[in-house]
Amino acid sequence: MSRIRATLIWIALAGAVAIPIAVAATSPQLAWRDPVYIAAGLAGVIAMAILLLQPLLAGGYLPGLPTLKGRQIHRLLGLGLLIAVILHVGALWITSPPDVVDALLFASPTPFSVWGVIAMWAVFATALLAVLHQRRRIRPRLWRLLHTGLAVVIVAGSVIHALLIEGTMGTVSKIALCAFALAATIKVILDLRVWTLLTRRRA
Amino acid sequence: MSPITPTRRSLLAAGAGAALLTGASGLLVPARAQGLAPTPTMRGGANNYRPGAPIVDRIGGGGFWMTGTVRRAGDGAPLEGQRIQIWAHTTEGHERDPESHGATLTDANGEFRLEMPQIVPAFGQAHGHLAYDDPDFETVFLRPIMPDASNTSLQAHFVLQPA
């Protein structure tokens, strides 16, 4: 890969990640919010940005970060995603407890919260499986299938969640970030041909 | 001639037919005053409710209007002097803040109007909260959503069931 191409890829990625965060961090709506609520929103935006990075790292698509190295960062960012989701929900809880209780009990009037809660549980399940995987308590093949399935739930759920919300993210940068995250997720699943694990005979 | 003995199937069919007729006539005459149904409480309507908000001329600096009507279930008669409590996330405060809450009374036409600060999107939607929570009628909590966050008014209507 040429140097210019590598540089362009990194610039594009930096823009796709940094622009939505910058737009959210300067939203006029922040003027009507206290710091805890602002932090809750930003944690959500950062989580969305991580959802774009994760498939790119897993697939080894980023220049200078081949698959093995990329996956080291993927694991770290996975932990970062877990923390961002906990901060997002925790800070929303502090801002308005009854709204978060409704969301967690799937009794919310807002159509988007159910998708966020589904994605949240999928993140928690992935974290648990990742620990089991590291301790070699589950078969690698099962881990890979479950991780991929949960990743689809996380990305799809989060994208629907984000798109339906009227929040601090800019419309254009939000749609772009969601589209990139979806596209990257679909590409890495196609490239790694994960579904073949379902039919392949055990070695 | 033997008496008609309804089978399980014929009863089911008759029931479905009756339900269909009732449903269809309900659609044809939706506003029959005789049968005006009470407004159900909305999901999440009571969130961040602070009972006993004071009756005020205006909540905060104003600039936004919450309006609506209060009628009696059944005959649809307008209800005067009913206390409606209102709160929202606005340019001046969060839903939980006491100063975001206020109440007003309906006039002789059963209408209410309360000026309040501009409602802004919170928890993903620009929405308001209203409560009827007094002894004469059943308690109702509403959570209307603004079609556009730049709107400067919002409406909500109560049909109350006598307690």
Image (cartoon, helix red, strand yellow):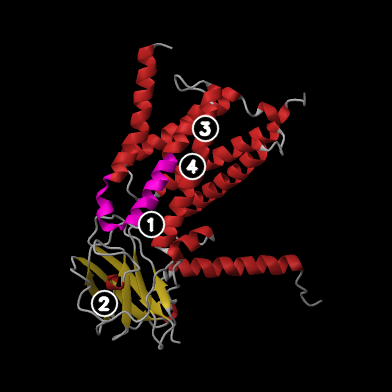
Residue A170 numbered tag? none
Q: Amino acid at mark 4?
A: Leu
Secondary structure of the residue carrying tag 3 is helix
Magenta residues, dominant SS class = helix
Chain letter belonging to callout 1: B
Question: In the image, which disc is placed on residue B123?
Answer: 1
Label 4, label 2: how far apart the Cα atoms are: 47 Å
Mark 3 and mark 2: span between their CA atoms?
A: 56 Å
Label 1, residues with CA under 10 Å away: few <14, some 14-19, many ≥20: many
Numbered disc 2: secondary structure: strand
- Mark 4 vs mark 3: same chain? yes
**How many numbered discs, if any?**
4
In which chain is the residue bearing label 4?
A: A
Q: Earlier in the sequence, mark 2 or mark 1?
A: 2
Do marks 3 and 2 share a subunit? no
Which residue of the protein is positioned furthest toward the right in this rendering?
B2
Q: Chain of mark 3?
A: A
Q: Residues within 10 Å of mark 2 (few under 14, many from 20)?
A: many
Q: Please, what is the three-letter code of the amino acid marked with disc 2?
A: Phe
- Which residue position is annotated with label 2? B112
Mark 4 and mark 1: span between their CA atoms?
21 Å
B79 lies above or below A102: below
> According to the image, label 3 marks what residue?
A74
- The magenta stretch is A26-48
In the visual, does A37 lie left or right of A28? right
Question: Looking at this view, is B54 or B80 the one in front?
Answer: B54
Q: Amino acid at mark 3?
A: His
Residue A112 seen in the current view: no
Q: Left or right: A86 with respect to B79?
A: right
- Looking at marks 4 and 3 on the same chain, the residue that comes earlier in the sequence is marked by 3
